[in-house]
Structure formats: structure tokens, C-alpha cells
Image: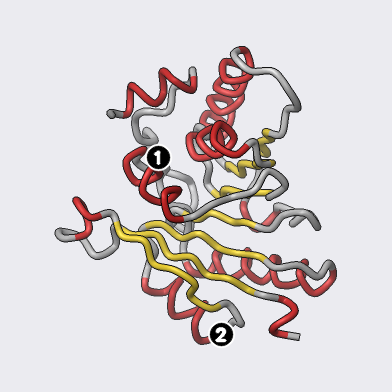
Amino acid sequence: MNEKYYDAILNIKTEGEQKGFNQSFHYHRYEPTPYSGLDILFNHYELKKDDHVVDFGCGKGRLLFYIHHLYKSFVTGIEMNKDLYHDALENKKRYIKQRSGKDNIHFQCCLAEEYEIHPQDNRFYFFNPFTIQIFMKVVNHILQSVEQFQRDVELILYYSSDDYIFYLENQTSFELKNEIIIPDLYQNNPHEKFLIYSLNYIKQS
């Protein structure tokens, strides 16, 4: 099944990469996670209806609509690029036209480090959206939120940089829970995989 097929099922338009570059070198250009990769991820990783997923650098919202379609989870997309943010809002209009029920899809146009982690947020997705400096700030905000509102949280990393991994494993209490490779791509590129890092608050207390 190709990209156009899935976009048609969800009634959205998410193909293509970001045109131009971001003003800050700390933020990487947007590129959507391949649907083939999402299929593999969620064949091995399950979400619940009451999970709250935050996608940092969500672009046009592909991941969030895919998750909502499968699980009806609460999903929030954080996007700094105004054009991509507006594309995501247009996709939301098209997506919800075909569906009934509670609207659990939200988008916010801001820098990742400016997003206020909500007490219900418990799953966080990163497709290598920014440099390690920004990643550390975001993870620190997540950890502060967990200290204040005790809960288990997980990070889902796709195409993760070595800096992300080193930081999580050496400077935080997150532990690697699972590694999910994309077979057709991984053999040529070891970054083509998902890493699931978990923080069990009760265990760490």
C-alpha cells in the first residue's frame, strides 16, 4: 500500500517534504514518517484510547491521524512552521468530515521547548525533529511534569540520532523497552528503526 492510498483512506494530504529551510539550524526539515514504517511500528506497539500522544515536529499531522484512526487516542501535534501548521489544520477538517464522535485531535503552532507538557500527556514521538540541545530541553520538561504529576511515560524515537540515544541512556532514567526495525530499509540504513524508551515512575521512585 502506497502513500497516496493511506492519505486517501484518511482523507488527508501529507505527501512531500518541507520546502525551504527553517530559520534556526536547531530545527530539521519536515519529512513524514513512511506509512510502511507506521504499519510495522503499530504491529508491535499498542496504544490505548485514553493515551495522550504528543508528536514534536508533527508537520502535516500524518502520524496523529493514523493513530487516531486506529486507536481513537488523544493526539497533539506541535509544529513551529506556520505553513505546515495550517496544512495540518486543513487535514483535520477533511479527516473529521468522515468521522463522528469526540474530537481528540489538537495542533499547536510553537517551538517544541515552549510547549507546556500537560499532566495527561504520556506518549511522545520524535522523528529526529531537532538538535540534541532542543531534545534535552523537551525531555527535561517531560521529566519535570512526571515529577509533578506522577505517571508512566514513553518516548517513541524514529531515525534517532546517536546523540539522542547517548543522552537518554546516560543522563536520564529512561530505559530502552523495545527496538522495532523496518526490515526492507534497515539492511541498508541502521537508523531505519523505532526505539521505545520508557520511564516507570513507580519503579524509579
**What is the crowding at mark 1: few (fewer than 14 residues within 10 Å), some, or many (at least 20)?**
some
- The residue depicted at 45 percent of the width and 48 percent of the height is 42
Residue 79: where, in percent of width, then height? 58, 41
Q: Amino acid at mark 1?
A: Pro
From the image, tell me which residue sits under label 2: 171
**Relative to 35, residue 159 above or below:** below
Report the side of 152 relative to 90 (left or right).
Answer: right
- Give the residue at the far top of this rendering: 97
Q: Amino acid at mark 2?
A: Gln
> Image quadrant of residue 32?
top left
Front residue of 119/67: it is: 67
> Image quadrant of residue 69?
top right
From the image, tell me which residue sits under label 1: 32
The C terminus is located in which quarter? bottom right
- The residue depicted at 72 percent of the width and 54 percent of the height is 121
- Which mark is drawn over residue 150? none
> Image quadrant of residue 76?
top right
